[in-house]
Image: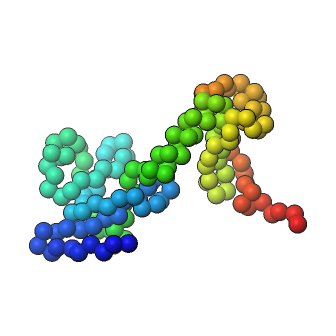
Amino acid sequence: MTKIPIDKERGIDPHVITCTRCGKEHGLSLGVLMEGTDAEGNKHYKNKGDYKYDRDHPYISWEEITDPTRKIAMGICTDCEDQLAKFDEELAKGGIFFKCEQCTTTGMIIGSHPLAIATRLQLAVVAPNPVGVEFATCEEHTPQDE
């Protein structure tokens, strides 16, 4: 990771931007950052002194971010964007979403898989309408017979 010098006079303060979906680092923000929460509970970020943002969002109270880790979860990375686009394509072909209850892993089962076909038939949900299954556990947690 590249080190960025902090100018004490101008207050440049680097923050690493992480993906809200996978946690991977995907950006960098410079300057003193402020965080606020709107009435619906959505997080908003702005640079300190950005008064235009205040005019656009008058009901948010702002606090300076003082988290020593300097990491902010905001947006999704390009890998997740690509994966979600592929999920949309597969959904149109009959794919179904899955989630493991134990580890919260999520993904897509391709439309030609017997489980996807059976699930759509049993629930009477045709593509491209979304449908999904949740497993109590997945292969990662299932002991394998040797």
Answer left or right for 66 relative to 48: right
Q: Is residue 66 above or below residue 48?
A: below
Total count of labels: 0
Answer left or right for 15 relative to 106: left
Answer left or right for 71 relative to 133: left
Q: What residue is rendered at 67% in x and 51% in y?
A: 100
Colour pattern of the rendering: rainbow
Q: What residue is rendered at 37% in x and 46% in y?
A: 41
Q: What residue is rendered at 38% in x and 53% in y?
A: 74
- Residue 4 is situated, as x and y percent measured from the top left of the image, at 27, 72
The picture quadrant where one finds residue 87 is top right
Q: Is residue 29 above or below residue 37?
A: below
Q: What residue is rendered at 14% in x and 56% in y?
A: 49
Towards the viewer: 109 or 53: 109
Q: Is residue 143 above or below residue 135?
A: below
- Quadrant where the N terminus is found in the figure: bottom left
Answer left or right for 24 relative to 112: left
Towards the viewer: 112 or 108: 112
